[in-house]
Amino acid sequence: MFKLLSIPLTMLLLVATAHSQPTERRIFCCMYQTPAPGSIKMLRPVYIGVAASTDLGATWKSMGWRTNRTNDIACDPAKPAQLYLANDYGLLVSRDDGATWKLATSDSIPGVLSVKAFGDTVLLGTPTGVFISADRGATFTQRNAGLRALNGTYVSSVLPLRGVWLAGTADGVYRSSDAGASWHASGLAGKAVDRMVAGPAGTDILAAWNARDGVWLSEDRGKSWSAWSPALPTRLVQAVLFPTTDKRTVIVATKDQGVLRTNDGGATWTNSSGGMQNLNVTALARDPEDEALLWAGTENGVYLSDNRGATWKLSALQLGYVSNISIW
């Protein structure tokens, strides 16, 4: 049973909603590390909890959600008003587009690091393993068979693909071909995986990374992995994005050099951070309807590019440390 959650503000979640014809797009940015309360009045507005924009960030409206550090957010495309929010308290669910939230998990799931939703299924990555709901978050079952303790059950990222699910853990990547009933190690043992992302549609490419060792690439849907691109100028990678249908074009967000871009599969790289005032870039996303529109999160706000990442401009909301960006 759900229970109402009331908790103090230690972070914020930004939700930007953009409309276009004929398809609606919504942009969700998970954020934490807001300014100290005494500084807020001297800076631009800080949107407490969930803020929404319907004009690509030109204006924002606070929706009033207050929470601890937020790690991820998911949306059921068939029910766009139903949102799933992963944070340090567990999984929060809204069935009214973020107007109200309820805690969907019990004390057995103290925190959620990654969430994905499709149909009736909700898939969670947590510090104690994988949890699955088959009823839109009403109940959850733990699915850890094959995840090696202790580090193998620290699941920081889940990536469900057609016919295979992947879990990025503190002990490499695990793969399941039976909807999470069992898991098998598929590489990067001993490496902590922060996040994973799929390559362009129609390819078997996947990328995994952390902010210490750089990027690993798989060309067989996660069956095997290898370190990628010795030419990459830094190992401090915090996000990876395939911005076009060309698998050779990749951009990465780094902790110390902003946005880096390759158009030749990693053989050479160029800096693509023009217009950014902060080079600690923490998140990347592409608009699903217009590949020229890219979003980047930093430790101090959100940037938008309308030219495929060649240059960037600061969005209206400037405060807060962005941990993740999702768009539907």
Image (cartoon, grey):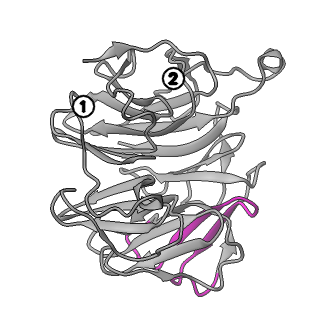
Q: Nearer the viewer, residue 12 or 251?
A: 12
Viewer-closest of 9 and 284: 9
Quadrant of the snapshot with the N terminus? top left
Identify the residue at horizontal 71%, vertical 58% (top origin).
255
Camera-near label (2 vs 1) is 1
The image shows residue 156, relative to residue 140, as above or below, that is below
Above or below for 26 versus 254:
above
Seen at 63% across and 84% down, the residue is 268
Is any part of residue 21 visible from this angle? no
Horizontal and vertical percent position of residue 103: 37, 22
Quarter-of-image position of residue 90: top left
Residue located at (21% from left, 27% from top)? 138
Provide the residue designation for mark 1.
137
Which residue position holds label 2? 50
Q: Secondary structure at mark 2?
A: strand
Q: CA distance from mark 2 to mark 1?
A: 21 Å
Specify start and end residues of the magenta stretch as a single range.
244-268
